[in-house]
Amino acid sequence: MTAGVRDERPIRERAYVHIQRKIAAGELAPGSAVSELALSKELGSSRTPIREAIGQLVAEGLLELVPNRGAIVVRLSRQDIIDLYELREALEVYAVGKVARQSVNEAELDRLHAISNEILVLRAELARSGHRALDPRQMHNFVAADLSFHTLLIRMAANARIMKVLNETRLLIRIFAMRREGHSIADLERIHGSHAAILKALAQRDGDTAMRLVSEHIGTSQQERLQQYDHWRREASLRASLPVFLDAHAVS
């Protein structure tokens, strides 16, 4: 909100957005409890609208209820990631096909190019730094640019229902993606090239090519997230077994 401007939204809606933002920012990590009392103090409200907002987020799959703990931020399984990406692919491919069949707005295409070129700015920063991958601040900027690109692209399809579902889907994916490593120069070049090819197909009103490119783009992202998930699970398993391994050697 702009300073001095009163937020006139119902407190339940404000609480709903507030919790989503805390999750998206990593302030509420996967598996962490969501405190009605803390949120009511942050928002200066009673606990009833907070409880209603939590109930809505549970129904949407962002939170889950655990006995003796209450609501916690959902922890995604490998199959959850697959399911979410399949949903994202189905909706985004359809939306891009619809955009290509319409009269493509040149101003919106220019805006998409400008957003995508922010990835090249990050690439240049990384090259100058001599580091192997983007640091957390740069990754935050990358995620913001990538999210803006896809959000504007889908908004051009003018379907509010698709937009809502995709926003929820992306937020769920981001819960796991908080663990992701920074992108390399090669990663940034590949992603920018993929965005540029999609925009070229849209400018040419080539719906089939645009849809295929979006499908491939999302498929690549899915494989990266699954590889990341498998690596994280291996690391977690190793950490869990390490004390046993050390105890066994101490006895011997």
Image (tube, rainbow, N blue to C red):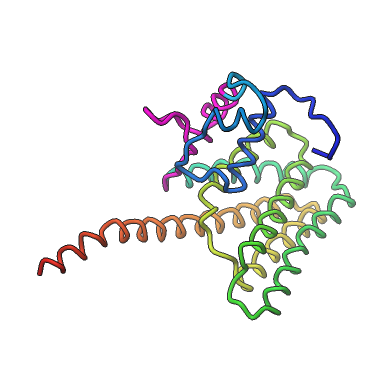
- The answer to whether residue 68 is magenta is yes
Vertical comparison of 251 with 223: above or below: below
Residue 40, given in percent of the width and then of the height, sits at: 61, 27
Which portion, as a residue range, is magenta?
51-78
Residue 190 shown left or right of residue 205 in the figure: left
Which residue is at the far right? Answer: 107
- Residue at 53 percent across and 59 percent down: it is 180
Front-most of 209 and 124? 124
| Residue drawn at x 73%, y 43% as measured from the top left | 154
Q: Which one is in front, 79 or 243?
A: 243
Residue 58 shown left or right of residue 252 in the figure: right
Which quarter shows the N terminus? top right
Quadrant assignment, res 251: bottom left
Q: Is residue 37 above or below residue 134?
A: above
- In the image, residue 206 lies at what x, y percent? 76, 53
The single residue placed furthest to the left in the displayed view is: 252
